[in-house]
Amino acid sequence: TWGRVQRDLLEAVGKNNYTTWIEPLEFNTVENGVARFHVPTTFIGNWVSRNFGQQILMHLTRAGAEVERIEFSVAPKNGARKDAVSAKEFRTKTEAPAPAAPVVRTASANGSNIDLPGAPLDKRFTFDTFVVGKPNELAHAAARRVAEGGPVSFNPLFLYGGVGLGKTHLMHAIAWHLHRTRPDLRVMYLSAEQFMYRFVQALRENSSMQFKEMFRSVDVLMVDDVQFIAGKDSTQEEFFHTFNALIDQHRQIVISADRAPVEIKKLEERIASRLQSGLVVDLHPTDYELRLGILQHKVEQYRESYPGLKIQDGVLEFLAHRISTNVRVLEGALTKLFAFGSLVGREITLDLTQDCLADVLRASDRKVTVEEIQRKVSEHYNMRLSDMIGPKRHRTIARPRQMAMYLSKKLTSRSLPEIGKRFGGRDHTTVMHAVKRIEELKAVDNQIAEDLELLRRMLEA
Ligand code: ADP
Ligand code: MG
């Protein structure tokens, strides 16, 4: 029945929710009206229980199972991932008709009664597998220093940089290293989103005291992607207090974000200033040398899974040259190439590479076009693409059109007259006016600023 329930849930919650939350559940048993599932982490258990518990219960019942209640317990799936915290017991229940608040029973190995439910750590993300080059050497050195507890302590360590440049990898590496060398330390790693989720949950359950206690009892706290809490006022506030309490007690803090503290919009100034009171280092975009190094390192790792697979000289150099985006894309390309090579059972040649990776290579070459901008903007505002170039002057259409013109100016190398031409033959002064107008609006209208940021990110992705 679980198979059928899974299909029903997929339909009910949508593909994204399904892959993120339902797929990780491992069905265990139904006994005495209790359906039991294994979940990889407490976080997932709590979240699923709160947000999907009722639906799972309903679909199980519909499928004929006699279930009144659901229980989740933590068990790493296939041992592939390990929880950031030591032994613990955890239960969360969903009961019909009203879901009970998830109960977290805690008992940690060292006898203390405070649980540290961090996010899972990826076992591949260690210092051993991190390739160091010019663009990331400072960040790497700082991370190592923190992990090894060197003479100078950087507190907090603030790592920032674009997507896929290794921030999460370095944070996990610190955690793994500490787990191994200082098992007595209480190390907690989680994303800012998870921090917020827990905080909101604590408020709802009137357990903010426990929340505070838990976070203030750690020796090392690592919060990933902290830009996420910008604009979320009460979460920022709580984060700030947690942060200060830990720093005052000389506990180590490591933070990451996609940009420098002062560049994070809607982050309170006092928080930004505290965030940069330690060491701030950025991960620069990868250069050719580093990309080649990473590829060579990866190939070594792949040899285990694909013994005997040959790769022609020059292929890695070609990839390092042509794929200049983030490391995740680079890794994805190599994985695909190896899988393909082993399928066809041939040496990986340059020709094979170009065939197999045609789409990746094209995407990597890709420049944003005015037409693409028009399409994305009109999708975003639910308007017809034809209205981008049409004559309508109503604000609901004219404004998005101006935004598209603005983005065209910012993201492409087209001149004002060229842009005007692509917007139904408008004059270059119209485009100029649009750019100026949006620039003004952006400064005073948060919604517009946010929309622009979002569109820009989608277009550049
Ligand atoms: P970020 O958190 O900055 O978005 P990640 O740490 O998730 O990026 O890195 C994306 C992927 O690229 C991961 O699989 C990571 O292992 C890999 N990666 C990034 N930088 C390096 C590096 N210097 N050496 C080896 N792998 C790397
Ligand atoms: Mg990350």
Image (cartoon, helix red, strand yellow):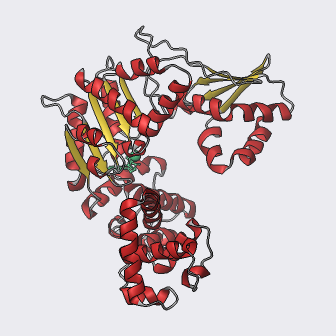
Residue 234 location in percent, x, y?
43, 34
In the image, farthest residue toward the top: 111
State whether residue 316 is above or below residue 239: below
**Quadrant occupied by the C terminus:** bottom left
Q: Is residue 273 above or below residue 355?
A: above
Q: Residue at x 44, y 87 (%)?
A: 420
- The residue at the far right in this view is 64
Image position of 47 (left or right of 140): right
Q: Nearer the viewer, residue 221 or 328?
A: 221
The percent position of residue 93, horizontal first and vertical second, equals: 66, 21
Q: Quadrant of residue 441?
A: bottom left
Q: Residue 240's spot in the image, x, y percent? A: 33, 32
Q: Residue at x 32, y 42 (%)?
A: 268
Q: Is residue 63 visible?
A: no
* 107 horizontally vs 188: left or right: right
Residue found 19% across the figure and 38% down from its top: 277
Between 289 and 284, the residue placed more toward the observer is 284
State the image coordinates of residue 270 (x, y, percent, origin top left).
Answer: 26, 39
- Residue 248 figure quarter: top left
Residue 102 visible somewhere in the drawing: yes
